[in-house]
Image (cartoon, rainbow, N blue to C red):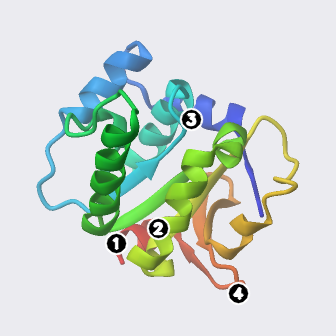
Amino acid sequence: MSILPKYGLLQYRNSVRIYNKTVEESLQSFKDEGDYNKVTIFLFHTPGQLEELDSAINFLNNFGVLIYVDWLDEEIPTDTNGTIAKHAKQVIKEKIKTNSKFIFLGTEEAITSHWCSWVLGHVHPQKPMQDIAILPIRADFTDYGGAEYLEKFPYIHEIESEVYGVRYPNGDAIELAKWMES
């Protein structure tokens, strides 16, 4: 799996910002965007990784898509006791179905998270494989040793300088912009 460097994603985020905003301000402006005639993407990530999330949102917004992030959804409470967690899981399953695409922000922390593993286990039965992708991010270029289950999912990678694509497990590939439209 071709892994995008974390510093590259952070540099991309900083290069597309028109003016200085905090990560929280940037995420709020993303939340306030209009959704007219846009492909919708459920961007799933590990809680607490706001810098990586903001970088990924800035990267994906370049493709003119509408991004859904669960923690900005007021329907999902932040408390995770048994009853509330069950409700959150139902909402997430529904959002997986209703968004056109699903992208898993594959940071090192996300790969080891039980919650993220649960979501990945529920994505494929709800979405066709061609509508799922992992955006693999690491601080270095090593692989995700011990997480071989990720190899069954398509992933986003850099084809050449600033040109990105989605590569499927069978080796087929499509440019990311075309994948977003399909």
Q: Type of residue at label 2? A: Val
Q: Earlier in the sequence, mark 3 or mark 4?
A: 3
Q: Secondary structure at mark 2?
A: helix
Q: Residue at x 56, y 32 (%)?
A: 52
Residue 170 numbered tag: 4
Q: Type of residue at label 4? A: Asn
Q: Earlier in the sequence, mark 4 or mark 2?
A: 2
Q: Type of residue at label 3? A: Tyr
Q: Residue at x 54, y 56 (%)?
A: 118
Badge 3 crowding class, 10 Å Cα cut-off, few under 14, some 14 to 19, many 20 or more, is some
Residue 123 numbered tag: 2
Relative to the observer, which residue lies in front, 15 or 167? 167
Q: Position of residue 34 (x, y in %)?
A: 14, 44
Q: Secondary structure at mark 4?
A: loop
Q: What is the distance, in whole Å, between disc 2 and disc 3 at their CAs?
A: 28 Å
Q: Residue at x 32, y 45 (%)?
A: 88
Query: Circles 3 and 1: CB distance less than 8 Å?
Result: no
Give the answer, above or below, for where 94 lies relative to 34.
Answer: below
Quarter of the figure with residue 65: bottom left
**Residue that mark 1 sits on:** 181
Q: What is the distance, in whole Å, between disc 2 and disc 1 at their CAs?
A: 20 Å
Q: What is the distance, in whole Å, between disc 3 and disc 1 at their CAs?
A: 22 Å
Numbered-mark total: 4
Q: Is residue 63 left or right of residue 150?
A: left
Mark 1, mark 4: which one is toward the viewer?
A: 4
Residue 12 numbered tag: 3
Q: Secondary structure at mark 1?
A: helix
Q: Is residue 31 left or right of residue 46?
A: left
Q: Position of residue 79 (x, y in %)?
A: 36, 27
